[in-house]
């Protein structure tokens, strides 16, 4: 049987193990705050004006 050692007298490594065992899990919850981006800000990553213009001719257009 292990002897009782107070938390203050434990090594940092042992304190870390005790702290990790007391901590719980968030499960499927993501604790990140999500903020919707403003529509007024230009976003380079969005494909707004890709130059495609929605035309699709298909393969039969050149036959």
Image (tube, grey):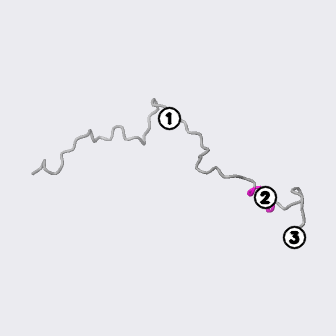
Crowding at dot 2, Cα within 10 Å, few <14 / some 14-19 / many 20+, comes out as few
Tell me which segment is drawn in magenta: 13-21
Q: Which residue is mark 1?
A: 37
Question: Helix, strand, or loop for circle 2?
Answer: helix
Question: Helix, strand, or loop for circle 3?
Answer: loop
Q: Which residue is mark 3?
A: 1
Above/below status of 8 relative to 46:
below
Above/below status of 53 relative to 4:
above
Q: Is residue 35 left or right of residue 7?
A: left
Marks 3,2: beta carbons within 8 A: no
Tally the numbered discs: 3
Which residue is drawn at the image coordinates 81% and 62% (left, top)? Answer: 14
Q: What is the C-alpha distance between the residues marked 2 and 1?
A: 40 Å
Question: Helix, strand, or loop for circle 1?
Answer: loop
Crowding at dot 3, Cα within 10 Å, few <14 / some 14-19 / many 20+, comes out as few
In the depicted view, which residue is nearer to us: 43 or 38? 38
């Amino acid at each position: 049987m292990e002897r009782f050692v107070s938390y203050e007298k434990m090594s940092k490594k042992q304190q870390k193990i005790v702290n990790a065992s007391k901590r719980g899990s968030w499960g499927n919850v993501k604790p990140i705050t999500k903020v919707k981006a403003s529509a007024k800000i230009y976003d380079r990553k969005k494909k707004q004006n890709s130059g495609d213009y929605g035309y699709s001719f298909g393969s039969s257009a050149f036959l």
